[in-house]
Image (spheres, helix red, strand yellow):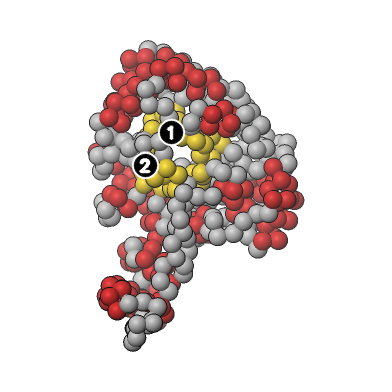
Amino acid sequence: STETKAHYPLSLIDAMRFPKQSSDVFSSTRTRKYQKPIIFLLTVTALCAILAILSPTSITSSVRRQLELFEPTMAMVMSPVPPIPTWTLPNGLKYPIVAANTASLSAAQTEAMVLKSLSLGITNIDVHLGGTERDGVAAVLRRIPRDRIFLVTKIDKPPNDMTDPEAAAQLVRDTVAKEWPLLGVETVDVLLLKDSASCAVMQAQWAVLEALLSEGKTRALGTYNYCRFSIDCLLETATTPPALNYIMRHVGMGPDATDLVRYGESKGIRTVAYGTLGEPVALEELLTDPTLLQIAEGHGRSVEEVALQWNVQSGFAISNRPSADYAPDNKPDMMVCHGPDGDCEAALIGMRRIGTWELSRAEMTRLDGVRLEEWSQSPTYYSSLGCANSFGVVAHPTESSCGIVDTEWCGNLSFLDSVR
């Protein structure tokens, strides 16, 4: 179930059917309301078609991206696709449950991917601060109104040797003072706090986040990779509990093996799943799992889409890497977007299809029962040493599976010569 009702927009044919009598589907008033936008969209479409016919090679990547700004409206008119559902957070903020995660993309590819996301109606963008991802999102924000993006970002973990709570609190203040101007924003929609092995440090940093919420620097607060220890620590002193906790969840881990989801939600904290294909690479064992492959074939979907649908249909929001080609050994960028313009189109289209099809109860049960054996994957995989089985203490793969597995979200890299 979702809290946002699906509204199906007018089809192009219906919108152009001018009323002649009172029994017509639309009144003349409503028709006049849609005439100008539809004429404008038809004009843009016609111009694009003429350009493509006369000189298909002359349409540069830049021009295509500019035209993509019109695609959300055109797509909704031409194809009645339900909007992405939202959750209502405790303070009333509407949270879109499908997010495109920019993790490890170059600035150019972040920009291309975000523009493609927006063109498809995916407005929730999850970005890391302090590098190329931020620069790519900032480039997009210079071109479009701020309210076109639902912006989620996170405060990084303090250094392991930072045990002074006041120093850790100041680190948060300094990060926001530096990064918000570089992003070109006065506020973000959700600000997440990564954990620390020190409870006192987490409590001090959370108090700063609460102050930022009061100051309007963020509209909601959440946590990232918080295990039970971290949640309990935070709730001891928090006046505003986190609305969301981002953890890893993928087929092969079981529905809630560590009971973390149930525990967090018993405290009023909803769960957002990242790592739908595994971390820090899309796992070969997952991409080639016989159960996933069989279900994907039966629905005419990719394995990646089935993995996404399992999470969403289980009741989770997702923050998803829009590619299967990511790995620590990928150089120079740890994640690579595929598509004609390096914009992750295939993955983003799969993400946008969420909610337009469903897995059967029997299929969900089969996916719940899948277990992957090769790599240990904790829900709080990127946590500090305060949580069990974190990334820093367990063995993990480092090479992309895209050199091994033929899967939809791995693709041709020829576009990279023009991007870099």
Give the percent coordinates (x, y) of residue 328: 54, 38
Identify which amino acid the numbered label 2 is placed on: Leu
Farthest top residue? 164
Asked whether residue 101 appears in the rendered view, the answer is: no
What residue occupies the far bottom of the structure in this picture? 20
Q: Residue 243's mark?
A: 1
Q: Identify which residue, 230 or 112, lies in the foreground.
A: 230
Q: Residue sitting at 50 percent across and 19 percent down?
A: 232
Is 327 in front, or is 201? 201
Residue shown at 39% from the left, 56% from the top? 118
Asked whether disc 2 touches disc 1, contact meaning CB atoms under 8 Å apart, the reply is yes
Q: Nearer the viewer, residue 203 or 376?
A: 203
Q: Please tell me which residue lies in front, 259 or 57.
A: 259
Answer with the quarter of the image where residue 51 lies.
bottom left
Q: Which residue is mark 2?
A: 93
Amino acid marked by disc 1: Ala
**Which mark, by number, is residue 141?**
none
**Tag 2's secondary structure?**
loop
On screen, residue 294 above or below 12:
above
Give residue 341's position: percent from left, percent from top: 43, 61
Residue 387 location, x and y as percent? 56, 22
Residue 72 appears in the figure:
yes
Pick whichever of labels 2 and 1 is earlier in the sequence.
Answer: 2
Q: x, y (%) of residue 399?
A: 60, 42
In the picture, measured across the screen, residue 267 lies left or right of residue 371, that is: left
Label 1 Cα crowd, 10 Å radius (few <14 / some 14-19 / many 20+): many
How crowded pointer 2 is (Cα within 10 Å; few <14, some 14-19, many 20+) is rated as some
| Mark 1 secondary-structure assignment | loop
Q: CA distance from mark 2 to mark 1?
A: 10 Å
Number of disc labels: 2
